[in-house]
Image: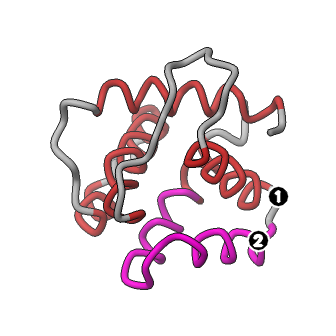
Amino acid sequence: MAASLLPLLNHLRLTALGCRCAARADLFEACALLSSDKGQARDAYAEALIRCLGQALDNPPLFFRPGVSEVSFDEAWLMRLVAAFQGDDTASAAFLICSRVPKVHRRNLAFLAHSVSDQFRQI
């Protein structure tokens, strides 16, 4: 995994810790409710992605604690997806999404992952 994605991975891990006791969010509703305020958008997109990822994957994703050097399969897959969007590699992004996400959830998950990649492009 690229070192440039480590800050994003740690941010998502922190977000996952905060979302552990929160109710799972519906993927469609989360996409509709996201804030357009730039100051809140980064955290809002990350939280929406983490809270909806289990629904999109049909299993709860495994996130390790922030700072852990080991990377879970779910984390590696998500970082590859973000890297594909950041590199404008839509073919790889589509392949990654199609390989794990049921068709009904693909568009919304792609929107959230692409939005997270845009929000963290500056890091």
Majority SS type along the magenta span? helix
| Circles 2 and 1 in contact, beta carbons < 8 Å | yes
**Which residue was labeled with disc 2?**
92
Residue 49 screen position, x and y as percent: 42, 50
Compare marks 2 and 1 and give the one earlier in the sequence: 1
Magenta-span inclusion, residue 90: yes
**Is disc 2 placed on a helix, strand or loop?**
helix
Pick the front one: 26 or 58: 58
The answer to whether 98 is drawn above or below residue 25 in the figure is: below
- Vertically, is 76 above or below 28? above
**In the drawing, does residue 65 fall left or right of residue 94?**
left
Residue behind mark 1: 87
Q: Residues within 10 Å of mark 2 (few under 14, many from 20)?
A: some
Kind of residue sitting beneath label 2:
Ser
In percent of width and height, residue 28 lies at 28, 69
Residue at 59% across, 39% down? 72
Residue at x-position 81% and y-position 68%:
89
Distance in Å between CA atoms under marks 2 and 1: 10 Å
In this view, the residue in front, 118 or 109, is 109
Give the quadrant of the C terminus.
top right
Label 1: element kind:
loop
Q: Position of residue 63 (x, y in %)?
A: 48, 34
Q: Nearer the viewer, residue 71 or 6?
A: 71
Q: Which residues are magenta?
A: 89-113
